[in-house]
Amino acid sequence: MKTEKISLRSLLNKMLASDGTDTELRKSLHRALAEPDPLVAWEQTLEIMQAMSKSGRVRWLGVSERNGERYLRFQDPGSLDVFSLKEPPALKAEVAPFLPRGFVRKEDSDRIETLFTSIATCRSEDELGGVLQRMLATIRDMISADYCVIHLSDESVRQIIAKVSDGSPEAPARFAPALVDKWVKDEGFCVNVPDLGREAELAKYSGGLFASVVVMPLRCKGKTYGVLETWSRLVGNFGDDDLGFLSLLAMLAAGMIKNAEHLETLIFRDPLTHVYNRGYLEDQLEREIERYKRTNEPVSFLMMDVDNFKQVNTNFGHPVGDLVLSAIAHSLEDKVRHIDVVARYGGDEFGIILPDTIGEHALMTADRLRGVIEATDFAAICPALGDAKITISLGGAICPFDAVTKDDLIEKADKALAQAERSGKNRVVFFSLPSGEGGT
């Protein structure tokens, strides 16, 4: 038996030279050898060694440290030779398969049962935030974490629930976005850094407050909704059972978020155009006006009507009219900011909320949308329309200059829209701006 240090490339070549190397393993070894990024090659090799360890083809002996460097130690079960593979200095975060393990102590079973009951009975987006908050509190108590947070990556989900966190009032920065995006969000792995003090590039995200962190994907049916970060002030605080417990709760949280996303679609989306419906629009406009009262940040509101839409239905039929409405809705939503809200108000009317937008900026946005629809080739969407021209008219009102309540703002925008239609259509009129300004 001998013990030797071995380089990554030498280890891969040694495994390739083995008589017992099967076809699939050879493919994996060749991929790792051909990988130009040393960190990616390292991660690929770790996966290979994990698989070989599980099958008994190598024996995992753990990690040793020497002169500030770490070595992963493996043994050949046949020759009993031991190989020490030096860990690369750039990144020592452990990237582990996202698999549940043992997760609960007997004395915590009642609390787990209560939490699982809450999860099972969660039926609305209003309840979801509270259940996730209880989940984070349970995590903190059961595995002695100091801070837990859920970061959501899906925009539609962020509109259902805000960021949820629990624990220390001193919050760390969002952990290693590039690393998390690659491994956790895209690949579905978890990231475990047991000692941030040894990782200069990763320690900066802790703000000097925490010593270890685990990041789990919120993943359900192939879609990642965000991540669960769990932080501790202690080095090596999270063991295998803790990782299994976190992975189980992360999967349950993802399932709840997926259900809430489905509920949001059923409750707040218009079934024809798939933009928001009137109920959501009015609720969101109310929130924006309340936000103005707290922050003095203005909000503009647009009412939009399809010019001569009755003639489209009469001349071409309601199915063609539905296609026109859907195409307009898609164009509007595609051409506004992610913070803006486009909703079908009713029939061929749409409402658009423009937060933090005022005066000329609101007018320019409205006229840009008008121009987009005027320039759209609707015959390419529905050949039956031929050379029929589809245009829109828009009316706008601004909080606080025109109104400071939801109903008044909608009423003023509606009056401005009526003026735009009386003035010849295919134009923009704002209640507080000269009639016809912004139109054509």
Image (cartoon, grey):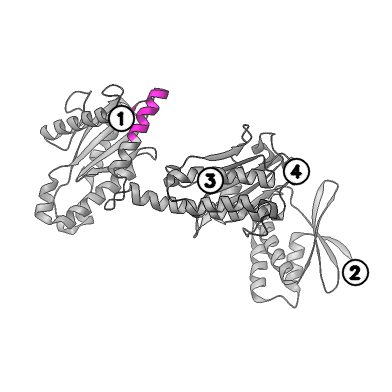
Spatial CA span between label 3 and label 1: 34 Å
Q: Residues within 10 Å of mark 3 (few under 14, many from 20)?
A: many
Dot 2: few (<14), some (14–19), or many (≥20) neighbours within 10 Å? few
Residue that carries the numbered disc 1 in the rendered image? 300
**What mark, if any, has residue 132 been given in the picture?**
3
- Looking at the image, is mark 3 or mark 1 nearer the viewer? 3
* Secondary structure character of the magenta stretch overall: helix
Amino acid carrying mark 1 in the image: Ser
The reply to whether dot 4 and dot 1 touch (C-beta < 8 Å) is: no
* Dots 4, 3 in contact, CB < 8 A: no
Mark closest to the chain's N terminus, 3 or 1: 3
On the rendered image, what quadrant is the N terminus found in?
bottom right
Task: Give x and y (percent) for residue 355.
Answer: 36, 32
- For marks 4 and 1, the one nearer the N-term is 4
Q: Earlier in the sequence, mark 4 or mark 3?
A: 3
Q: Residue at x 66, y 51 (%)?
A: 108
Residue that mark 4 sits on:
235
